[in-house]
Amino acid sequence: MELIVRLDEWFDKKLEGLSCSRDTRAYVSGVLTKYRFSRDDMSRSSIVLSFADAKLSGKFEEYQKIGDWVLFVSAFHPKSIKEHKKIIHDIGTMSYVACHKIMMGKWPVYEELSQKFPHLIREIANVFNDVRSSANGE
């Protein structure tokens, strides 16, 4: 059994092969770390209605919360969104597009997340499926 002292470092190491910039990988590691004890849990919320609310308010934080939640749930709980995966991934992508626009392109991480979102989700899910399989002795 592997002892994990710093979860953020563990995520960063596991995601070393992710096809994105170092900054985006660090952001993804941060998102995954954040959701271990997060008050940003959206599991009981409608992602569609949350996105509609974000569009009405235009608040960066709301778009970021949605994109981050979709990233997390897609990586660790893909079965929970299986039925509506396409629309949920589209909303995650659009949320990061909105973040990029609100930031006026000053932080390229959101642009990269919006452009590579479905691909990154698959890569991340594969990494952690491999980790779960090896932990289960498969």
Image (cartoon, grey):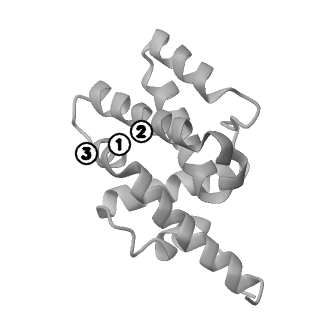
Element under disc 2:
helix
Question: Which label sits in the foreground, 2 or 3?
Answer: 2
Q: Callout 1, which amino acid?
A: Ser
Q: Quadrant of the C terminus?
A: bottom right
Q: Please name whichever residue, 38 or 137, is drawn nearer the observer in this view of the structure.
A: 137
Left or right of 18? Residue 129 is right
Please say whether residue 107 is visible from this viewpoint. yes
- Residue 108: mark in rendering: 3
Of marks 1 and 3, which one's residue comes earlier in the chain?
Answer: 3
Of marks 2 and 1, which one's residue comes earlier in the chain?
Answer: 2
Q: CA distance from mark 2 to mark 3?
A: 14 Å
Q: Please name whichever residue, 126 or 99, is drawn nearer the observer in this view of the structure.
A: 126
Q: Residue at x 49, y 56 (%)?
A: 121
Q: Please name whichever residue, 70 or 22, is drawn nearer the observer in this view of the structure.
A: 70
> How many numbered marks, from 0 up?
3
Q: Are marks 2 and 1 in contact (CB under 8 Å)?
A: yes
Q: Residue at x 67, y 26 (%)?
A: 46
- Residue 114: mark in rendering: 1
Q: Residue at x 59, y 41 (%)?
A: 69
State whether residue 63 is above or below residue 124.
above
Q: Position of residue 66 (x, y in %)?
A: 54, 34
Question: Which label sits in the foreground, 1 or 3?
Answer: 1
Of marks 2 and 3, which one's residue comes earlier in the chain?
Answer: 2
Q: What residue is shown with label 2?
A: 93
Please say whether residue 3 is visible from this viewpoint. no
Q: Position of residue 4 (x, y in %)?
A: 67, 77
Q: Callout 3, which amino acid?
A: Pro
